[in-house]
Image (cartoon, rainbow, N blue to C red):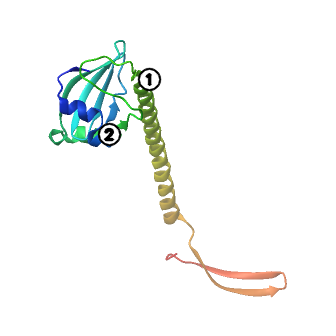
């Protein structure tokens, strides 16, 4: 890891409270060659850049969680745990390559975004049809023939006459 850091930050990246609180990653789906990501530990928010060719993490900036604005706090809800044990340190390069894991998270975010976009389009189309049906029901209520049954008369075994009359209240 390169950049501005502290022993406390490294300890949190490796899992606060003896590994009980592992960091979560929120990957920027618009990353190209190198991958922008945010790491959330128990007490810190860390904005980083994963340099793919060199396989190392550059901390661009970090801050305590209590100083975050609402947008940054909200982005933690989309962060995912790494899922594999990774040991961070401040002075050496690691043989561990985060690139496949980060690329996988980028693909998931892109799929999720396209799903949300498709769902939004579907909801717009459904709203159009709902409005159309509502208008048709209004027209039917206003222009329908309104009759009510008053009585019937049995003329024969196979013939019944029903008496109806116009009723504006129906």
Q: Residue furthest left?
A: 67
What's the residue at 52%, 75% (across, down)? 170
State left or right for residue 141 relative to residue 59: right
Percent coordinates x, y for residue 143 in the rendering: 52, 64
Percent coordinates x, y for residue 4 in the rendering: 17, 23
Q: Mark on residue 19?
A: 2
State left or right for residue 21 relative to residue 150: left
State left or right for residue 46 relative to residue 126: left
Number of other residues with Cα within 10 Å of mark 1, as a class: few under 14, some 14 to 19, many 20 or more: few
Mark 1 touches mark 2? (CB < 8 Å): no
Percent coordinates x, y for residue 37 in the rendering: 31, 27
Above or below for 32 versus 121: above
Q: Mark on residue 23?
A: none
Q: Quadrant of residue 47?
A: top left
Percent coordinates x, y for residue 50 in the rendering: 32, 21
Q: Secondary structure at mark 1?
A: helix
What's the residue at 46%, 52% (across, down)? 131
Q: CA distance from mark 1 to mark 2?
A: 23 Å
Which of the two residues, 70 or 137, is positioned nearer the viewer here?
70
Q: Residue furthest right?
A: 157
Circle 1 is placed at which residue position? Answer: 100
Which of the two residues, 143 or 91, is positioned nearer the viewer here?
91
Q: Quadrant of residue 124?
A: top left
What's the residue at 19%, 40% (across, down)? 65
Q: Residue furthest front?
A: 18
Q: Quadrant of residue 13?
A: top left
Which of the two residues, 141 or 81, is positioned nearer the viewer here?
81
């Amino acid at each position: 890891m390169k950049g501005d850091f502290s022993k406390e930050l490294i300890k949190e990246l490796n899992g606060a409270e003896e590994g009980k609180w592992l960091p979560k990653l929120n990957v920027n789906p618009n990353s190209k060659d190198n991958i922008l990501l945010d790491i959330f530990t128990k007490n810190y928010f860390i904005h980083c850049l994963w340099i793919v060719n060199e396989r190392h993490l550059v901390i661009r900036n970090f801050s305590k969680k209590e100083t975050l604005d609402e947008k940054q706090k909200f982005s933690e809800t989309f962060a995912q745990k790494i899922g594999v044990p990774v040991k961070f340190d401040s002075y050496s390069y690691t043989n561990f390559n985060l690139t496949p894991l980060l690329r996988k998270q980028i693909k998931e975010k892109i799929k999720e975004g396209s799903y949300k976009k498709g769902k939004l389009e579907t909801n717009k189309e459904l709203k159009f049809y709902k409005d159309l049906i509502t208008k048709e029901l209004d027209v039917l209520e206003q222009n329908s023939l309104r009759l009510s049954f008053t009585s019937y008369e049995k003329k024969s075994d196979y013939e019944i006459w029903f008496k109806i009359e116009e009723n504006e209240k129906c």
